[in-house]
Image (cartoon, grey):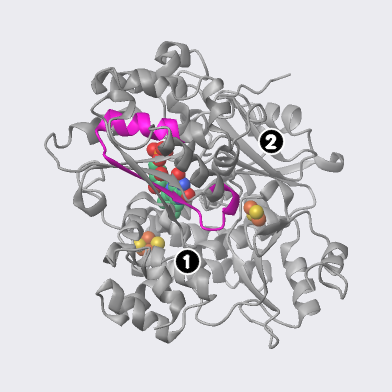
Amino acid sequence: MDNNLVDVFSLFDGKEEELIPILQKVQNTVGFLSNDSMEEIARFAHVPKSKVYGVATFYAQFRFTPKGEKHIMLCRGTACHVKGAPRIQEEIENHLGIKEGETSKDLKHSMENVACIGACSLAPCIMVNETVEANLTPQKVEKLFLSKGKNK
Amino acid sequence: MVKEKRICLKNLGKINPESIDDYIEAGGYKVLESAVSRHHFEIIDEMLNSSLRGRGGAGFSAGLKEKFTSESCLRCEQKYLICNADEGEPGTFKDRIIMENDPHLLLEGMLIAAYGIGASKAYIYIRGEYYKSIEMVKKAIDSARKRGFIGKNIFGSVFSVDVEIRLGAGSYLCGEELTLLESLEGKRGYPRIKPPFPAEKGLFGFPTLINNVETLATIPTIVGKGSEWYLKLGTAESPGTKIFTISGDVAKPGFFEVELGTTLRELIFDLAGGMKDDKKLKAILLGGAAGTFVDETVLDTPTGFDSLKEKGATLGSGAIMVLGEDKSVLNVTQSILEFFKHESCGKCVPCRVGTDRVARMIKEINNGIYQGESGLDDMIYEAEYMAKTSLCPLGQSLIMPLRSLKRYFNDQF
Ligand SMILES: Cc1cc2nc3c(=O)[nH]c(=O)nc-3n(C[C@H](O)[C@H](O)[C@H](O)COP(=O)(O)O)c2cc1C
Ligand code: SF4
Ligand code: FES
């Protein structure tokens, strides 16, 4: 078994109720949930693999393909929408050449839509990894993602 | 000009939220210390007398919920307290402000509530994307545990409790209390049917009290200063203070804690600096997606759970989204209805099919290709049967914004 998984499992008792925290920890450590990881998790938590998939596919947070180095979360909340989020999304998609839900071939960027991220007074905003980028304009987006931008 | 009155945010900017010493110096954990030396009925009575109404949106009496949970079974081996910090209602970020700036106040409130109902285990279920909040609450739990405020025999009493953090996994529906329980048990986020209520059969079948962050963060002040002091704040039907989060076309968007009864005009024009670029006000969306649209005729209504209800509006989570004259109410409605469609869990047919149908209708209306006579009436018709037949409050919520559109913005359709 992958050493990463051994480390993660050592933090838990292997009870069914721990399924979501286990999935979260595995995803945080490995980056995504591979079919092999899912199998090991099922064995560890003493539940069928279908149950692990059932839970993991329900929640928007879990991914089954690798994330990019820079993971971009686009807020699709109402406050951001009103302040022009669709335009911002278009700009970012144009800059990076990937669409919402995709990861770039070089694994540099990935992008997904999320619900309101609680920074509505700074709308429109996105999150890049764990940092909120606020009050976005097409110009700002360009700066963020152009060749010298910090998120290129 | 109206001023802020800070209770949940009393320490904001005054203490270092990462320092338990700062919090203790500001009087922190004193209320917990005195609370555990009193009979737990006294704590619940204080909460009942304060008439505090839950700040998670529904406005149910916090004291009553504590009373039910504490009395539902006297010899249970286990009771649970859960802090709902899943904050997902668009436009709402008050819980984040509390957790980032005063996590110990929230913890103290949780511990007092746990003592009140006799819970030996508490969970705090935090929105997964709230990285900073998670970090702050984690640190607060660690340092409180080191001081013995969490753990066995707190302040030398018989009261023992442990606190654990759980992280949300990106489902708006999991903020709904019964769905949150399913998620905590490691299952898909499908709602449960009420009754039984969590006060009788909650987490793992045991009596459980679920409260919002802001509700719990108010408890140390109520129990510390007494319900009589608290009742002087706010209005008779909705006492106390409330944190409002204002976004959209205002000059100074942000969060403001004021006494309930403060009007929307005072909030928007005094505190949030008025309209941005002197635009004209077109609409206000109160309470997020599961909320209501109103126009300027509601500006002078005192805020409160019942006073706003009379106007066909909602206080909800305290989100205030301001739309200027250049914004389209229909466009915002489309965004809301798409949100519901996306977040519907699909367990029951009326909501699974209904949210999709209504989202398609508003899109057609906005694109000018809707075939029916009155798009709004047709959407209300759909939402009404959804309200009657859906399994959980999510499917029952669509009618709220739609009905408010009929009342205030019929001419826009
Ligand atoms: C779809 C849906 C989402 C909800 N999301 C939240 C939430 O994020 N946070 C919250 O405190 N309450 C939320 N609620 C309300 C909870 O079900 C519950 O009423 C609340 O946590 C009770 O706390 P209170 O009594 O302190 O208000 C939501 C309700 C519904 C129907
Ligand atoms: S009303 Fe909607 S969200 Fe609630 S159970 Fe039914 S499908 Fe799921
Ligand atoms: S709507 Fe985007 S942060 Fe709230």
Left-right relation of B315 to B294: left
Q: Which residues are magenta?
A: B107-133
Note whether A69 is above or below B174 in the view shown: below
Specify whether tag 2 is near ligand 3 (CB below 8 Å). Answer: no
Please check the rendered image and state whether residue B1 is part of the magenta-colored stretch, yes or no. Answer: no
Task: Give the label, 2 or 1, closer to the camera.
Answer: 1
Left-right relation of A68 to B98: right
Q: Nearer the viewer, residue B70 or A39?
A: A39
Image mark count = 2
Q: Which residue appears farthest toward the left when viewing the image?
A: B75
Image quadrant in which the C terminus of chain B is located? bottom right
Which image quadrant for residue B153? top left
Instruction: Return the x and y of residue B382 as percentages of the image width and height.
Output: 44, 62
Instruction: Return the x and y of residue A131 as percentages of the image width and height.
Output: 69, 58
Instruction: Return the x and y of residue B377 as percentages of the image width and height.
Output: 52, 58
Q: Residue at x 20, y 47 (%)?
A: B206
Q: Nearer the viewer, residue B332 or A104?
A: A104
Q: Nearer the viewer, residue A100 or B371?
A: A100
Please check the rendered image and state whether residue B121 is part of the magenta-colored stretch, yes or no. Answer: yes
Q: Chain of mark 1?
A: B
User: Callout 1: helix, strand or loop?
Assistant: helix
Instruction: Return the x and y of residue A74 as percentages of the image width and height.
Output: 66, 65
Note whether B264 is above or below A67 in the view shown: above
Q: Amino acid at mark 2?
A: Glu
Specify whether tag 1 is near ligand 2 (CB below 8 Å). Answer: yes
Q: Residue at x 29, y 18 (%)?
A: B37
User: Callout 2: helix, strand or loop?
Assistant: helix
Q: Which residue is mark 2?
A: B296
Image quadrant in which the N terminus of chain B is located? top right
Q: Which residue is mark 1?
A: B355
